[in-house]
Image (cartoon, rainbow, N blue to C red):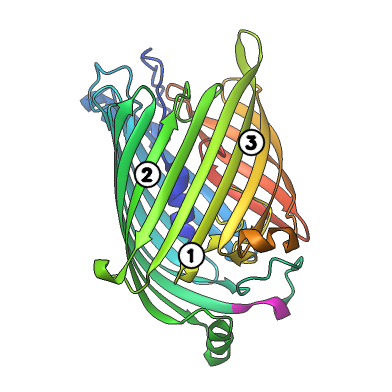
Amino acid sequence: MRNLFTLLLFSIIGLQAFSQEKPKVKVVQGDTIAIVEHALKKVDKNVNFTVIPGPVYNATQKLGFAVLPMIVYNINKKDSISPPSSTAVLFYFDFYGSWAVAAKQSFYWRKDLWRAFITVGYGDIKSKFYGVGRDKEIINNNDSNYVWAYQKPASFNLTCYHKIISHFYGGLELSYFNNYFDGKDSTAAAEIEQSGVPVGKNIQTRIIPAFVWDNRNNVFWSTHGYYSKLTFQYSNKFLFSDNDFYVLTAYVSGYYSLLPGSKRLSLAWRMFMQGGWGDVPYDQYANYCRGDDATGYTPGKYVNFSEANTQVEVRYDLWKFIAFSAYVGTGKIFGSIFNFGQSKWLNFAGANMYINLIPYRDIRMRLGIAIGRSDYGLYVGLGQMF
């Protein structure tokens, strides 16, 4: 299972292009965020600072709290084409005793000719384990359907993209993941192993070639254009990994303005597919609602080799600082294409409120709620859902 800090960390994936109009900084006495940003702007007016605080809750981790301080800036202030780069750190804890720290550095430079991302993280996460391959039934949250597990993940990822032509990028990601996964007690450990998931230490070293098409008008709040990505994860014992496996992932998102001459009302859609084969470790399985590819279900409840889902969201900017959205979607988890029809369709619907923390850069905090079949989820994130 991918841990919560990884989910939150990758929700801050890239930042958008923005207007070059200089912001007016208003400092309110006693407002720590405003004071920090004012101090930074004395050094460099190109810099923006914000802190994303918020509660985090789902049926896997219980109630928690996350704090995400972030600095946003342009590497070259004369470069009006590249999206802004950013430095962010995540601190997380919950009332089960879980905690995590993570950091992400994003770089955009040379008129968006190059993009690079570095992420590191470490944590001690306690969560519910529902098993693998239970996609032919609708599972509720009864205690009899899961056991408690814990993991201690450490990760490092380095990604670099280069523009090949027009809006088309090619790149490579190098990933190292070291995790200790076990049951809360001997009974839980036995049930986990009985489901086919080994307990103990697992090391993954992965090489991931990737291709990206990105012609969105704004990386962080898109109202027209497309974004698509194709990745192929390759892990082998030759690379000092404990598993030989392959994972193919593909998705595409589209964005449209629904009012002529206005960006206030827009529509976004997304299609996602993933397939894995070989000795795939548990945290690399398709895991429904592990990220923003689907919502409304407890992460870890529906897990298997493959996944397919689609969703559509309508967004409305009420005014400069607040936007609302509603969305619906469906998808499923399955072992292979041959038993696709046997798996249950997992429909979901939800709503988001977006709070524009830095209007100058259009950086928004997302608060959301979603319902699925016999399940639900509450979400806090940064930026558009997809």
Question: Residue 277: which numbered mark, if any?
Answer: 1
Instruction: Give the camera-side residue of 185 and 293.
Output: 293
**Residue 331 locus on image (x, y percent):** 68, 51
Say if residue 260 shows up in the picture.
Answer: yes
Identify residue type, mark 1.
Answer: Trp
Q: Is mark 1 on a helix, strand or loop?
A: strand
Identify residue type, mark 3.
Answer: Met
The answer to whether the residue labelled 1 contacts the one labelled 3, judged by CB atoms less than 8 Å apart, is no
Residue plotted at (74% across, 74% down): 142
Q: How far apart are marks 1 and 3 (CA)?
A: 38 Å
Question: Residue 28: which numbered mark, if any?
Answer: none
**Which mark lies nearer to you, 1 or 2?**
1
Q: Does 111 sit left or right of 322 as displayed?
A: left
Q: What element carries label 3?
A: strand
Question: Residue 353: which numbered mark, if any?
Answer: 3
Identify residue type, mark 2.
Answer: Ala
According to the picture, the residue beneath numbered tag 2 turns out to be: 210
Q: Residues within 10 Å of mark 1 (few under 14, many from 20)?
A: some
Q: Give the range drawn in magenta.
A: 143-147
Residue plotted at (55% across, 64% down): 305
Q: Distance between the residues labelled 3 and 2?
A: 32 Å
**Which mark lies nearer to you, 3 or 2?**
2
Residue plotted at (49% across, 70% down): 282
